[in-house]
C-alpha cells in the first residue's frame, strides 16, 4: 500500500535517546544557524532559489546560492540520485530548506481550491481516495494564514486573533485532485479541558488511521524559542512512523535582543539541533512566512514530489 511505502522511504528513522525532551531542551545552548549549517567536518551544499511552480521539470540553469547545508542533513527523496557534483546538487536544494528536488516534482501549481467539509471523526472525512497533506501546530502558529498563502486566497481558511478557532478536521480540495487539511491547534490553555482532550484524540486517530494521508506538515513558530510541546509532537509523529515535514512559520519576524528575543534563524537552529537527537536521518524542513510568502513555492514543490511518488506507488 502507498502509505506503507511512504513510511519505509520518506520518514526519517526515529530512535529514542536516554535523555528526555525536557532535559535536552533545558541543557542545549542555541547555536547560530550559520554554525549549525556549516560544520567543517561535513561536506556541504548551498540551498538554491526555488523553481517556479508552473514548471514541470527541473531547470538546468544555475541558481543563486543562499544557505549552506551539510550533505548528511539533506532530505533526499527515494529514487533520487545524489551521486553528482556539488554544483548540480546545489541547484536541486530548495531555498530555505534541506529538501532535494526529485524527478517527481511536477504539477505543483495551484489553479483552484475550495472548502469541502468539516469532520469530527476520521471516518467522516472525504472518501474519494485523493491524497492529502495535513497542517498541524500549536494554536496561533499561523496554520490558516499559511493555508491561505499556499492557495493565494485571503479567506479560504478563516483566520482569527483568538487561538483555538479550528475545532474540526477541515478538508480543502486543490485542483480537484488532492487535499490540504487544516487540523485543530494544540496547546491552547484557555480552551476547555474536555475540548482539548477531544481534539487531541480525534487528531491522533486521523494520523494513525487515515490511509490517504501523504504527510503531516508540523508548523513551528520560528519567532519564539523552542517549546517542549512542539518537540513532543514531533517525536510522537516519528515514534508512530507518520511521515512529517517541519514548517517553520513567521520567519519574517525579528525580535529585539534587548527584550530577550532571538532571531528566527536562531530559534530554527535550536529546534533542529534538539530534534536531531531523536531521528537517525534528518526530517525535511522549510522556513516560511505568510506575510512575505517566503517558502510558499518550496512547500508546493515538496508536496508535489511527495504526492506524485505516493500516487505511483
Image: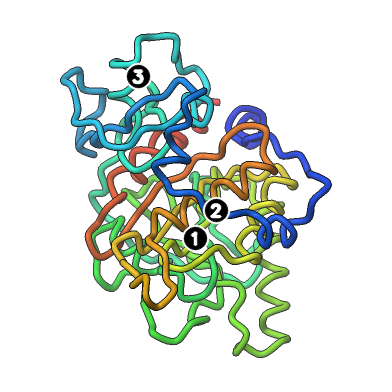
Q: Residue at x 23, y 39 (%)?
A: 53
Q: Residue at x 47, y 35 (%)?
A: 306
Secondary structure category for the residue under label 1: strand
Q: Which mark identifies residue 290?
A: none
- Residue 242 percent location from the top left of the image: 65, 45
How many marks do you count on the picture? Answer: 3
Which of the 4 image quarters holds residue 29?
A: bottom right
- Residue 280 percent location from the top left of the image: 67, 33
Secondary structure category for the residue under label 2: helix
Residue lying furthest right in this view?
A: 18
Q: Report if the CB atoms under discs 2 and 1 are less than 8 Å apart.
A: yes
Judge from the rendering whether residue 197 lies leftward or rightward of residue 271; answer left or right.
right
Q: Residue at x 46, y 44 (%)?
A: 285
Query: Dot 1, crowdedness within 10 Å: few (<14), some or many (≥20)?
Result: many
Mark toward the start of the polypeptide (2 vs 1): 1
Placement of the C terminus among the 4 image quadrants: top right
Nearer mark to the viewer, of 2 and 1: 2
Mark toward the start of the polypeptide (3 vs 2): 3
Q: Which mark identifies residue 220?
A: 1
Task: Please tell me which residue lies in front, 310 or 148.
Answer: 148
Q: Is residue 271 above or below residue 164?
A: above
Task: Please tell me which residue lies in front, 175 or 60.
Answer: 60
Judge from the rendering whether residue 118 lies leftward or rightward of residue 192; answer left or right.
left
Task: Please tell me which residue lies in front, 82 or 19.
Answer: 19
Task: Please tell me which residue lies in front, 203 or 69.
Answer: 69
Which of the 4 image quarters holds residue 243?
A: top right
Q: Which residue is mark 2?
A: 271
Q: Which residue is mark 3?
A: 89
Judge from the rendering whether residue 285 lies leftward or rightward of residue 51; answer left or right.
right
Q: Residue at x 60, y 72 (%)?
A: 186
Amino acid at each position: 500500500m502507498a502509505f506503507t511505502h511512504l513510511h519505509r522511504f520518506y520518514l526519517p528513522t526515529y530512535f529514542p535517546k536516554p535523555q528526555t525532551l525536557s532535559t535536552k531542551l533545558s541543557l542545549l545552548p542555541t547555536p547560530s544557524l550559520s554554525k549549525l549549517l556549516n560544520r567543517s567536518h561535513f561536506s556541504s551544499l548551498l540551498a538554491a532559489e526555488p523553481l517556479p511552480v508552473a514548471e514541470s521539470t527541473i531547470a538546468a540553469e544555475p541558481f543563486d546560492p543562499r544557505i549552506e547545508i551539510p550533505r548528511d542533513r539533506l532530505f533526499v527523496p527515494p529514487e533520487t540520485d545524489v551521486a553528482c557534483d556539488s554544483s548540480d546538487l546545489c541547484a536541486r536544494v530548495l531555498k530555505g530548506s534541506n529538501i532535494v528536488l526529485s524527478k517527481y516534482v511536477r504539477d505543483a501549481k495551484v489553479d483552484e481550491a475550495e472548502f469541502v467539509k468539516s469532520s469530527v471523526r476520521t471516518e467522516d472525512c472525504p472518501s474519494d481516495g485523493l491524497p492529502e497533506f495535513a497542517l498541524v501546530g500549536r494554536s496561533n502558529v499561523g496554520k490558516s494564514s499559511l493555508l491561505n498563502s499556499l492557495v493565494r486566497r485571503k479567506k479560504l481558511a478563516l483566520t482569527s486573533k483568538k487561538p483555538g478557532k479550528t475545532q474540526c478536521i477541515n478538508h480543502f480540495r486543490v485542483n480537484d485532485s488532492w487535499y490540504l487539511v487544516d487540523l485543530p491547534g494544540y496547546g491552547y490553555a484557555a480552551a476547555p479541558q474536555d475540548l482539548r482532550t477531544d481534539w487531541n484524540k480525534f487528531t491522533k486517530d486521523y494520523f494513525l488511521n487515515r490511509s490517504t494521508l501523504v504527510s503531516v506538515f508540523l508548523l513551528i513558530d520560528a519567532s519564539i524559542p523552542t517549546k517542549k510541546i512542539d518537540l513532543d509532537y514531533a517525536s510522537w509523529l516519528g515514534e508512530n512512523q507518520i511521515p512529517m515535514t517541519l514548517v517553520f512559520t513567521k520567519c519574517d519576524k525579528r525580535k529585539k535582543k534587548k527584550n530577550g528575543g532571538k532571531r528566527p534563524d536562531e530559534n530554527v537552529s535550536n529546534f533542529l539541533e534538539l530534534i536531531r537527537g531523536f531521528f537517525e536521518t534528518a526530517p525535511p524542513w522549510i522556513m516560511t512566512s505568510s506575510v512575505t510568502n517566503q517558502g510558499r513555492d518550496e512547500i508546493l514543490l515538496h508536496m508535489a514530489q511527495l504526492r506524485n511518488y505516493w500516487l505511483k506507488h
